[in-house]
């Protein structure tokens, strides 16, 4: 494949302390985590930015912190939490929204991943966060407008989904059976346990969230007590350990238990690599035979029946498995019949559908096939979709009334 046909796929792990960036290309699909310090494995880039006093240029990460220590500018940190609170700051007598500084920081790290060459087009960027929320997604929608990347090329997922993409992209012997990840930040430990139904195609994946509680000062003993409880009667191929709590050489007895009949890995870039795999899979670069429906994914499909080339077909408005924060579609259709529209609601892998009919009350009376409708579907939760229909009329002969009908569809 020629260089000008290459695409780059980027996964960004973002929290209030740091960002981590991984990338892959069409020719080299295995994700590689990048460092802001050449030749090092310092993958965590501090979420900090500073305007250099002398030049007025923006520096970021470790360099921003060094500039403040050298009294060469004031470093702004905790950009994510401050952006969520719509905080402002004053730099060299000018007022800045902190979310603008976060956007500048993210543009810098996107450039870090894109140093492979200007001819490499961005295929997909996936951001991953510990949890998603409407407030976070509202912030990121603003950020995305500042990045210079087409919105359709950007997706947002949470850490649990990143783990799903990471775990099932490892060598077969590491994902032959179930997979677990322990997260240890501060004192509390959490385990995510991934299992899948192998009888169906595609395989349905579930992730259990297990609270392992707090570890005391005798962490090795406490962890060695947790492991058999979590792994009881389970066949596990691999275990991953993430979080600053695993730093230091304290695991002795617990490590021996972890490695009994399975492989264990310690690292900090699992979620950024998982986001990078997601970027490739969502673009169809890698094969994928799994379905995962977590708390952020739509739980059902919404479709309408349309006529195409004299044949009836279903047109999907919202797909099960899509991130509900981003699930949205618009289409236009000609009304063929009475003033109502049927919507099919269907659970994934189910043959049965529930039909909801939205009546277009007071729609102007017109001959058949002379009413054009714009249908806008937008998820409002993982189990609810808002439908908005607007009457567009049809050309000069049948003027649009611009009447609008709304309806929210829900499943239990």
Image: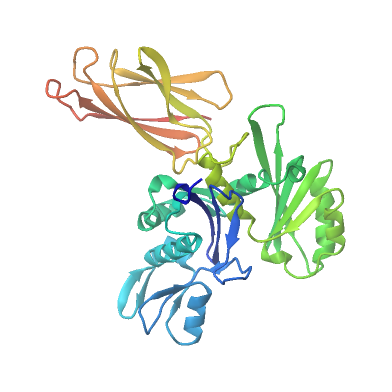
Residue at image coords 19%, 23%: 394
Instruction: Name the side, left or right, on which 74 lies relative to 368.
Output: right
- The spot of residue 191 in percent (x, y) is 71, 51
Q: Relative to the observer, which residue lies in front, 382 or 127?
A: 127
Residue 253, quarter of the rendered image: bottom right
Residue at image coords 34%, 20%: 341
Q: In this view, does 120 lie above or below 68?
A: above
Instruction: Name the side, left or right, on which 194 lies relative to 51.
Output: right
Q: Residue furthest bottom?
A: 71
Q: Relative to the observer, which residue lies in front, 30 or 301?
A: 30
Q: Residue furthest front?
A: 2
Q: Do we see residue 127 in this rendering?
A: no
- The spot of residue 13 in percent (x, y) is 55, 57
Q: Do we see residue 71 in this rendering?
A: yes
- The spot of residue 116 in percent (x, y) is 50, 59
- The spot of residue 367 in percent (x, y) is 19, 12
Residue 145, quarter of the rendered image: bottom left
Residue 314, quarter of the rendered image: top left
Q: In this view, does 148 lie above or below 408?
A: below
């Amino acid at each position: 494949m020629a260089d000008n046909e290459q695409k780059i796929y980027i996964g960004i792990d973002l929290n209030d302390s740091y960002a981590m960036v991984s990338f892959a290309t069409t020719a080299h699909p295995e994700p590689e985590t990048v460092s802001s310090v050449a030749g090092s494995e310092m993958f965590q880039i501090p979420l900090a930015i500073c305007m250099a006093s002398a030049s007025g240029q923006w520096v970021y990460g470790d360099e921003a912190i060094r500039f403040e220590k050298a009294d060469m500018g004031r470093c702004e940190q905790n950009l994510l939490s401050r952006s969520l609170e719509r905080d402002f700051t004053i730099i060299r007598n000018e007022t800045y929204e902190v979310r603008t500084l976060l956007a500048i920081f993210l543009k810098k790290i996107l450039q870090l991943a894109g140093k492979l060459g200007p001819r490499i087009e961005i295929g997909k960027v996936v951001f991953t966060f510990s949890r998603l929320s409407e407030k976070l997604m509202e912030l990121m929608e603003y950020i995305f407008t500042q990045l210079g990347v087409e919105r359709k090329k950007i997706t947002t997922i949470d850490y649990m989904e990143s783990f799903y993409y990471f775990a099932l992209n490892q060598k077969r012997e590491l994902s032959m059976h179930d997979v677990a990840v322990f997260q240890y930040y501060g004192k509390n430990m959490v385990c995510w346990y991934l299992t899948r139904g192998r009888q169906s195609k595609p395989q349905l994946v579930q992730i259990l969230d297990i609270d392992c509680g707090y570890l005391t000062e005798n962490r090795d003993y406490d962890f060695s007590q947790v492991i058999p409880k979590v792994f009881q009667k389970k066949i596990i191929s691999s275990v991953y350990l993430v979080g600053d709590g695993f730093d230091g050489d304290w695991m002795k007895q617990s490590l021996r238990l972890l490695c009994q009949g399975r492989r264990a890995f310690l690292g900090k870039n699992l979620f950024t690599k998982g986001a990078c795999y997601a970027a490739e899979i969502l673009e169809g670069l890698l094969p994928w035979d799994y379905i995962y429906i977590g708390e952020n994914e739509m739980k059902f499909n919404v479709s309408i029946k349309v006529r195409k080339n004299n044949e009836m077909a279903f047109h999907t408005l919202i797909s099960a498995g899509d991130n509900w924060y981003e699930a949205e579609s618009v289409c236009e259709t000609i009304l063929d019949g009475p003033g109502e529209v049927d919507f099919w609601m269907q659970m994934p892998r189910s043959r049965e559908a529930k039909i909801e009919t939205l009546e277009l009350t007071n729609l102007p009376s017109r001959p058949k096939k002379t009413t054009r409708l714009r249908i806008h579907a937008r998820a409002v939760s993982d189990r609810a979709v808002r439908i908005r229909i607007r009457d567009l009329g049809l050309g000069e002969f049948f003027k649009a009334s611009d009447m609008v009908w709304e309806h929210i569809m829900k499943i239990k």
